[in-house]
Amino acid sequence: MVQRAILNYDENTRQILERQGYHFVGAHSHSAVKTCLWLRKSLRGEGNCYKGKFYGIHAHRCLQMTPSVFCNQRCVHCWRPLEAFNIDTKRQNVIWDSPEEIAEACITEQRRLVSGFKGSIKTNIRAFEEANQPKHVAISLIGEPTLYPYLAELIEAFHARDMTTFVVSNGTNPEMIREINPTQLYISLNAPEESIYRCVAHANYWDEIIESLEVLSGKNCRTVIRITCIEGLNMENPAGYADLLSRAKPDFIEVKAYMHIGYSRMRLPRTAMPAISRVRAFAADIADHLQGYRIVDESVPSRVVLIASRTSSIHIM
């Protein structure tokens, strides 16, 4: 289970992330857990995230984690400090913790983090009790999860604990996309063509992403393509997006606005964040070029529009 490694970040970077609410778990500090805004809101009865609106999950029962803080792209819109965690796994090896160790450590840490809400008068006690038994795992916190070589086994470890899994990948590792079967598998598609991809991702994995899209079309789990819309950068060529989507044949397509938060503010101006009206119009343009899909829902606070295959149903968790 062990591969010898050089970690590509220093103690100062780790401390910065810890101050931002990331909690490292496991012996080798490549996995982390963090509670999100919507978990806190859900505990207080103040709303649910768009995944709840679209797919029926409960945010207070969702464990947000990553088995790999590292990423192999440097996307301009990412709110995470990926510059400090960029890694080429072909040249650097990591000492990886086992799937069982990560699963147990994540659940333990999630319960510890949730425990702090018990004393608040705003906390719904029933929701608090449910939160202590996390039901959903969002494997999407920071970095690229498919860089963890035992991701399939980690998913199985969570499923064995009667938990559902959402994996969000950048699609750069098609072999791992073939191997894994989470409850719901996302691939981020943030360009309709290679030249725009290079401007967005600052990486060279376009061929791998195309292969992952083709792999996605044959998966047995629910599949989603997420398009992050960046004003002035990738909100063009809806026919190009539609062509790529037709190859992937996802159950759902999320067309979502880039949000001007975190480290992305160092790379993009606030004007790069499109209004929901722009996202809605762009999603409609994409849907017009697709056969067998229709717009079925949206979340205004998150600026996201949901397109679904006519054979897929929503509220499915």
Image (spheres, helix red, strand yellow):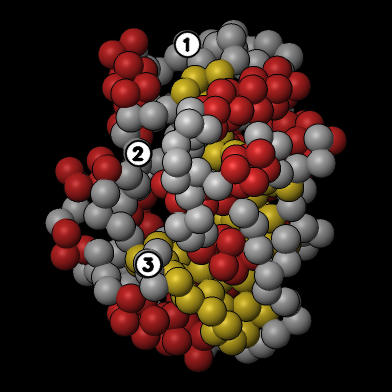
The numbered disc on residue 38 is none
Secondary structure state at the residue bearing disc 3: loop
Q: Residue at x 69, y 26 (%)?
A: 103
The numbered disc on residue 301 is 3
Instruction: Using the image as rendered, state which of residue 109 and residue 72 is in the foreground.
Output: 109
Chain-order first, disc 2 or disc 3: 2
Q: Residues within 10 Å of mark 3 (few under 14, many from 20)?
A: few
Placement of the N terminus among the 4 image quadrants: top right
Q: Residue at x 68, y 70 (%)?
A: 315
What is the spatial separation of the Cα atoms under label 2 and label 3, in whole angstroms?
A: 20 Å
The numbered disc on residue 80 is 2
Q: Residues within 10 Å of mark 1 (few under 14, many from 20)?
A: few
Q: Quadrant of residue 19?
A: top left
Placement of the C terminus among the 4 image quadrants: bottom right
Tag 3: residue type?
Answer: Pro
Q: Residue at x 16, y 65 (%)?
A: 271
Query: Taking 151 as reference, is 286 left or right?
Result: left
Question: In the displayed image of the protein, which residue is found farthest to the right?
Answer: 160
Tag 1: residue type?
Answer: Ile
Tag 2: residue type?
Answer: Arg
- Is residue 169 visible from the viewing direction of this image? no
What is the spatial separation of the Cα atoms under label 1 and label 3, in whole angstroms?
A: 40 Å
Residue 26 position in % (x across, y down): 59, 15
The residue at which mark 1 appears reads as 6
